[in-house]
């Protein structure tokens, strides 16, 4: 998994953060800010489609009118597989399931479709160990 983490952190520039809203108490808010601080473009994906951290939000992945490199998933495991399938549908390069988000079937489908995938990890935690030097 370390190689997948290293690849995503180094190569993915545009991150669709599914579940990102302006709720500052949610992990997605802080992780998106962290990614922005490390030069990544974040794209909020949430049913309310609100602007977060200065970036226009979208209600679904399919609504994003430009390419996305990584789909960062902050939803419960039982909903995450559908998001992974949507990531394949928009031709994302990678899918990242956050801490405690696990779906082995989604992992198998997503990697079989050629995407790089990480589960049950946080990019803000992994950055210090495997992220590119800033």
Image (cartoon, helix red, strand yellow):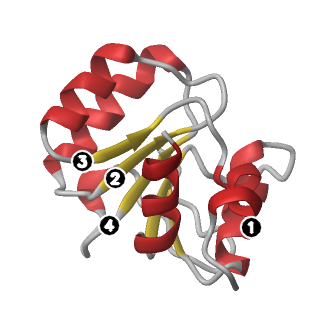
Mark 3 to mark 2 CA distance (whole Å): 5 Å
Q: Position of residue 121 (x, y in %)?
A: 62, 37
Residue 11 in view (yes/no)? yes
Task: Answer with mark 1 or mark 3, whichever residue precedes in sequence.
Answer: 1
Task: Answer with mark 3 or mark 2, whichever residue precedes in sequence.
Answer: 2
Task: Answer with mark 4 or mark 3, whichever residue precedes in sequence.
Answer: 4
Front in this rendered view, residue 103 or 44: 103
Mark 4 to mark 2 CA distance (whole Å): 9 Å
Front in this rendered view, residue 8 or 56: 8
Residue that appears at 32% across and 67% down: 68
Q: Position of residue 133 (x, y in %)?
A: 67, 81
Mark 1 to mark 3 CA distance (whole Å): 23 Å
Q: Name the mark on residue 34.
A: 1
Residue that appears at 19% across and 27% down: 109
4 or 2: mark nearer the eye: 2
Left or right for 77, reference 109:
right
4 or 3: mark nearer the eye: 3
Question: Do residues under tags 4 and 1 come within 8 Å of each other at their CB atoms?
Answer: no
Residue named by callout 3:
115
Residue named by callout 2:
94
Under circle 1, the secondary element is helix
Task: Answer with mark 4 or mark 1, whichever residue precedes in sequence.
Answer: 1
Under circle 3, the secondary element is loop
């Amino acid at each position: 998994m370390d190689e997948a983490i290293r690849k995503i952190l180094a190569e993915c520039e545009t991150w669709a953060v599914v579940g990102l809203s302006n709720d500052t108490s949610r992990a997605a808010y802080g992780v998106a800010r962290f990614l922005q601080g490390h030069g990544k473009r974040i794209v909020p994906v949430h049913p309310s489609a609100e602007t977060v951290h200065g970036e226009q939000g979208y209600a679904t992945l399919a609504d994003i009118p430009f390419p996305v490199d990584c789909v960062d998933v902050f939803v419960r495991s039982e909903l995450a597989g559908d998001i992974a399938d949507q990531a394949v549908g928009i031709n994302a390069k990678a899918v990242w399931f956050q801490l405690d988000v696990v779906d082995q079937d989604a992992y198998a489908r997503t990697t079989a479709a050629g995407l790089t995938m990480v589960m049950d990890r946080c990019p803000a935690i992994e950055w210090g160990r495997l992220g590119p030097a800033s």
